[in-house]
Image: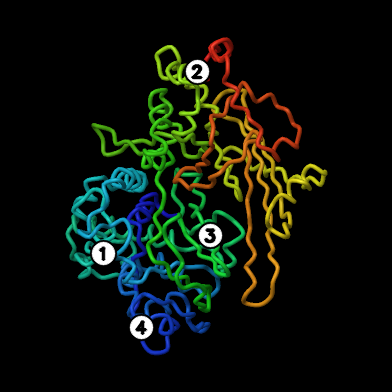
Amino acid sequence: MLPALLLQLFIGGVSAAALTLQIQNPFDSIFGNQPWKHYPKPHPNPEKTIYETIVSDGRFTALTKAINFVGDDIIEVLNDASHSITFFAVPDTALHHGRDDSEGEIHPTYREDYGRLFDVALADSSYERRDLVSAFGDPTPDFASIISAIDSVSDYSVADDGDGDHDGDDDERKRRRKVIKYIVNAVLQYHVLPFEAKADGLLENNTYPTHLKVPHAMGGHHQRVRVSHKYKKHKVKTFLNHHSKIVVPDVQASNGYIHVINHPIIPPGPVFQELFLFQNYFSIFTSALQRTGLTNDLDLRYKWDDDSDEGHFEGSPAVTVFAVPNKAFAKLPKRLQWYLFSPFGTNTLRKLLEYHIVPGIVAHTDHIYNRTAEDKPEVVKRCTCPACAENALKKKHPHREPISAVQVTLDTRFTNHTLDWLVERNKLTFPGHGKHRRPDEYETNVYVNYHKIKMVDIVGLNGVIHVVDQILCPWHHDGDDDHHHHHGDRDDDGWEGWESWLPQLAAGPSS
């Protein structure tokens, strides 16, 4: 398991490792002498490993530099012919885009998120925040700073003598080199999937495990990456964590596949920090969490003790949150809004928010991590009743093949109140033949308390975010198990006359 410090490398957001290439490499047919405007299908090279393919191509020099700087920790992963993997490779030309602005500075919006990730990453090591300044000149370095830092210690031998020390280096420089190595290794590990997959093999699920593991976050299990797709005519565009796009898929190597991407994959921060970044959408929700003292239930950070070189973790190592956007709060009656955010409604507001938080469980649509148990979610049979069949006919797709349906009862932060979680997955097949046939699609329909969720599987360092379009009310959820409810758009807003019942129902003791 990688030290938590590796988390840092995700932050930097860029794969940094490169290669020097010679004749007859599979990328020649991609790039040639042309600018990065066209991405022809490369010729596969099944005789070279992923590492050999990358380091032999002069258009991945930054990536090669990072890989070789880290050394065996990442080279053994990319060069192991006995295990098949998938690697997302960032070419030199892609490093001019993304979070780094034209000045090479990290965008202010991400600075706090980066800083928090570094804190968690450093926690399992003997390093402190001051070491980041020493190594990078900034406590929240961007990728350009990381590459420059590698250059600044490039005169050191890459090979270690067993304990990571390098003879002849003074203590400060050895410490600096170790910090840089930790961070770069973590970033690179996040660009590796521990299995072999072509691009079309990533269509079925929303999330996949990466090679990165961060102690204290989700029990040290694999950090996950979100994969989404846009379908246009007969082509599919695949995105990673919503921003990085696969521009050249399926470069075959002897131990798996390389997918060239147009931007480093940005690893997520803690769940609360991910929400806090998008104030245009979640400012009311995050403010309400702060107001009611629930921030720690979504956050994860390492707090240094004032009089010690050590510290302790604060927050939640695993959590699922059903986030409420600003528009959903705006749907509430005005008097109810005033009440919830007044001193008189704080207890009610807290209980409503607690009902949107599932502690100890990370419930993705395709993977569930339970911190305290190994229970598997219940796989339920698909409903074949007339109501369901009629609903399927309303869809425009000619053929919908059910794949699975998973139903789970989730215990929320609000004691003795649960959420019903249902995930239905279908394969959509379109008519036609040959190259003019539209590729198959996979759809995931997710319901919580019979309400369809529009945005799912936003990955976080310590959990997952699902966005609901209305506030879930625990006192409206009566446990009705009529399985047909999830097929409609049942209107449970039901806040009319709230003055006569809401304060009384919320008057019980806080959890």
- In the foreground, 139 or 111: 111
To which residue does mark 1 refer? Answer: 147
To which residue does mark 3 refer? Answer: 229
Asked which secondary structure carries label 2, the reply is: helix
User: Is tag 1's residue or tag 2's residue first in the polypeptide sequence?
Assistant: 1
Asked whether disc 3 touches disc 4, contact meaning CB atoms under 8 Å apart, the reply is no
User: Is tag 3's residue or tag 2's residue first in the polypeptide sequence?
Assistant: 3
Asked whether disc 3 touches disc 1, contact meaning CB atoms under 8 Å apart, the reply is no
**Residue shown at the point (42%, 34%) measured from the top left:** 315
From the top left corner, tell me how far across and down residue 502 is, in percent.
56, 14
Q: CA distance from mark 1 to mark 2?
A: 50 Å
Numbered badge on residue 210? none
Q: CA distance from mark 3 to mark 2?
A: 39 Å
- What amino acid type is highlighted by mark number 3? His
From the top left corner, tell me how far across and down residue 203 is, in percent.
59, 61
- What amino acid type is highlighted by mark number 1? Ile
To which residue does mark 4 refer? Answer: 21
- What amino acid type is highlighted by mark number 2? Thr
- The picture quadrant where one finds residue 414 is top right
